[in-house]
Image (cartoon, grey):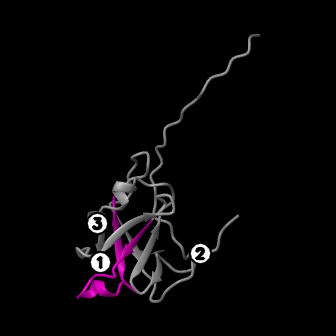
């Protein structure tokens, strides 16, 4: 028999999800990094343009304030919403709020399975989740 080798390529068709950083509390939780910064983590590497698009997030049912900064972090596996420059209204303090993550895409272009994922922001700054390994 002759030796034969080939490369097999499998397309990513798995929908990404918003990761829950607190499995003890009902719902999906974000991380409150400081009084003004919220970190939302995803199950896999995401499309940077998709997760940094402010239109893909709602503060409760309202659009994000124009002064909220959105940054991809952790190799595009998370996003930080920075509310520091918001001058008035409910979005000056994101603690205890619900942020709805709309249909964002992973690096392969797969959108989240649900049209909107409610993410609960803790009432006070939280430590980062423990590293698994």
Q: Measure the alpha-carbon separation of dots 2 and 3.
A: 25 Å
Total labels drawn:
3
Q: Position of residue 48 (x, y in %)?
A: 39, 55
Please name the residue shown 22% across and 73% down the image.
66
> Does the segment drawn in magenta span residue 94?
yes
- Numbered range of the magenta stretch: 79-103
**Secondary structure of residue under mark 1:** loop
The answer to whether 115 appears left or right of 37 in the picture is left
Q: Is residue 96 visible?
A: no
**Which is nearer the N-term, disc 2 or disc 1?**
1
Q: Position of residue 29 (x, y in %)?
A: 47, 76
Q: Position of residue 73 (x, y in %)?
A: 47, 64
**Which is nearer the N-term, disc 2 or disc 3?**
3
The residue pinned by badge 1 equals 60
Of 28 and 74, which appears nearest the observer?
74
Q: Outermost residue, top direction?
A: 1
Res. 54 mark: 3
The answer to whether 112 appears left or right of 6 in the picture is left
Please name the residue shown 44% across and 55% down the image.
46
Please name the residue shown 25% across and 76% down the image.
67
The answer to whether 99 appears left or right of 30 in the picture is left
Q: Measure the alpha-carbon separation of dots 3 and 1.
A: 14 Å
**Secondary structure of residue under mark 3:** helix
Please name the residue shown 46% across and 55% down the image.
16
Mark 2 burial class by Cα count in 10 Å: few <14, some 14-19, many 20+: few
Of 10 and 114, which appears nearest the observer?
10
Res. 129 mark: 2
**Which is nearer the N-term, disc 3 or disc 1?**
3
Q: Outermost residue, right direction?
A: 1
21 shown above or below 106: below
Mark 1 burial class by Cα count in 10 Å: few <14, some 14-19, many 20+: some
């Amino acid at each position: 028999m002759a030796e034969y080798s080939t490369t097999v390529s499998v397309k990513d068709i798995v929908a990404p999800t918003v990761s829950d950083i607190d499995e003890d509390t009902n719902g999906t939780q974000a991380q409150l990094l400081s009084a003004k910064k919220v970190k939302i983590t995803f199950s896999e590497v995401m499309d940077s343009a998709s997760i940094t698009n402010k239109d893909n997030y709602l503060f409760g049912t309202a659009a994000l304030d124009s002064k909220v900064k959105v940054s991809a972090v952790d190799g595009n596996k998370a996003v930080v919403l920075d509310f520091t420059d918001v001058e008035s209204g409910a979005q000056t303090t994101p603690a205890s709020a619900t942020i709805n993550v709309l249909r964002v895409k992973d690096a392969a272009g797969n959108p989240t399975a649900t049209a909107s994922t409610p993410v609960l922001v803790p009432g006070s700054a939280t430590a980062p989740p423990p590293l698994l390994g």
